[in-house]
Image: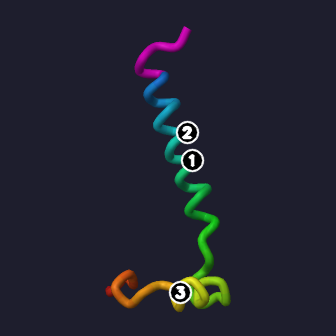
Amino acid sequence: MMTLYTRKVSLSLAVVVGVSLLGACADKPGSIGWCEDMSAKSKGELDRR
């Protein structure tokens, strides 16, 4: 039977893997899809660095 600690570790690992997989689906900067997404955003939504 799983202990509470093991369940927390397993859940945390599952969340990290899920977020990593979803982040890998983003378009690469400079690609056609990325440019289309940027042109669809309003000027206030753009990330200023």
Quadrant in which residue 34 is drawn: bottom right
Dot 2: within a 10 Å radius of its alpha carbon, few (fewer than 14), some, or many (20 or more) residues? few
The amino acid at mark 1 is Val
Please tell me the numbered disc located at residue 14. Answer: 2
Is tag 1's residue or tag 3's residue first in the polypeptide sequence? 1
Q: Which quadrant does the C terminus fall into?
A: bottom left
Q: Can you say whether 23 is above or below 11 in the image?
A: below
Instruction: Specify the label residue 17 is tagged with.
Output: 1
Percent position (x, y) of residue 5?
41, 21
Question: Which class describes the residues within 10 Å of circle 3: few (<14), some (14-19), or many (20+)?
Answer: few
The N terminus, quarter of image: top right
Q: Can you tell which of label 1 and label 3 is closer to the viewer?
A: 3
Q: Residue at x 56, y 83 (%)?
A: 37
* Mark 2 in CB contact with mark 1 (< 8 angstroms): yes
Residue stretch rendered in magenta on the structure: 1-6
Any magenta on residue 32? no
Q: CA distance from mark 2 to mark 3?
A: 33 Å
Q: Is residue 9 above or below residue 23?
A: above
Question: In the rendered image, which quarter is residue 4 located in?
Answer: top left
The disc placed on residue 40 is: 3
Residue type, mark 2 in image: Ala
Q: Residue at x 61, y 64 (%)?
A: 24
Report the side of 38 relative to 5 (left or right): right
Q: Nearer the viewer, mark 2 or mark 3?
A: 3
Residue flagged by tag 3: what amino acid is it?
Ala
